[in-house]
Amino acid sequence: MDTNILLENGTNELEVLEFTLAGNSYGINVAKIREIIAYQEVTPVPNSHPSVEGIFMPREVMITAIDLRNCLQRGISEKGGLFIITNFNKLDIAFHVESVQGIHRVSWTEIIKPDATMSTSEAGISTGIVKVNEKLIIILDFEKIVSDINPEAGLKVSEIEDMGKRKRSDTPLLIAEDSPLLNKLIVNCLKAAGYHNLMHTENGQEAYDIVQECLMNNTLGEHVKCVITDIEMPIMDGHRLTKLIKDDPRTRHIPVVIFSSLINDEMRRKGEALGANAQLTKPEIANLVRTIDGLVSNL
């Protein structure tokens, strides 16, 4: 299946690949997908996580295969089906699924954020739900799935400790990150790095509303001197937020740092075209701090 679908920059849209597991429909952002291949035999890895099926080497690249059905507590996958090979956070990982139904182009405004009424097993690893052709598709949080299996794949918080004691900074930073866990971790890391004047929001729309309110009150310089944003977020994504900030003469001077698991060559080109000042992958929390240091040093 061709997953090389290009979206215009900053349109607040995404392509969702729908796939099935145990009779249910799930989704993944096409931007995370390298390719989709038929199931291959894998080599089991001793003492690995129960959801890790093993490893295999298509085209001489070693890839870890994860049993997604097991991750969702829906039993163990049988041989057969498909591997969705992904790339995010600089990792190549194959997710074992039963079948692929197709690709849907949707707006982030159509993505419904999961709430506490959802079952615990899916609420923790779902970033949103979208209704397509009267069918509900649960979009999974693949970053969390991987970090639950291997915590080292998440934010490298220890890197902040390695930076040593730093001076306290009053520079106001605005953060847009929909994952409650990552939002908290980013805030804690920035505070540990000396940045304490922080506002954190759950999506690009909330962040943009703050910018607009500051413009109306003529307080932008007091409250927003740098924006750190994820890409994938319900209601408004990070690319749309970047475009709105950089297209407005009143706000284009504000540095925007895209901090996302999706930074690859194509996404980097998109971010550059939108005017992002820097783009970093999510494990690189120490590099995020250093980048912010450089961007705000002359403000």
Image (tube, rainbow, N blue to C red):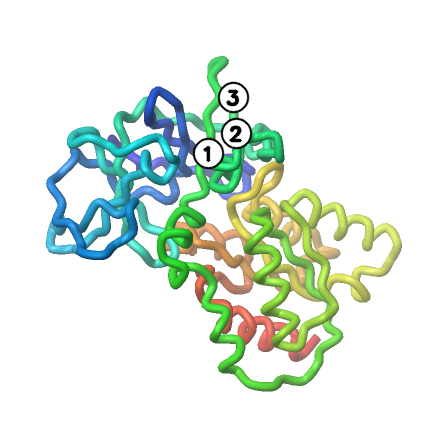
Query: In front: 113, or 250?
Result: 113
Residue 254 coordinates in the image, percent (x, y): 67, 62
Gap between marks 1 and 2 measured at Cα: 6 Å
Element under disc 1: strand
Residues packed near mark 3 inside 10 Å, few (<14), some (14 to 19) or many (20 plus): few
**Label annotation for residue 131:** 3
- Of callouts 1 and 2, the N-terminal one: 2
| Residue that label 1 marks | 139
| Residue that label 2 marks | 129
As shown in the figure, which amino acid type bears the numbered disc 1? Ile
Residues packed near mark 1 inside 10 Å, few (<14), some (14 to 19) or many (20 plus): many
Residues at discs 2 and 3 in contact (Cβ within 8 Å): yes
Q: Residue at x 47, y 41 (%)?
A: 125
Query: In front: 221, or 141?
Result: 141
Vertical placement of 137 versus 63: above or below?
A: above
Q: Quadrant of residue 182?
A: bottom right
Residue 208 coordinates in the image, percent (x, y): 70, 48
Residue 220 coordinates in the image, percent (x, y): 79, 60
Residue at the farthest top position: 134
Q: Residue at x 59, y 69 (%)?
A: 189
Query: In front: 120, or 147?
Result: 120
Residues packed near mark 2 inside 10 Å, few (<14), some (14 to 19) or many (20 plus): some
- Of callouts 3 and 1, the N-terminal one: 3
Q: Residue at x 18, y 54 (%)?
A: 45
Residues at discs 1 and 2 in contact (Cβ within 8 Å): yes
Element under disc 3: strand
The reply to whether residue 14 is in sight is: no
As shown in the figure, which amino acid type bears the numbered disc 3? Lys
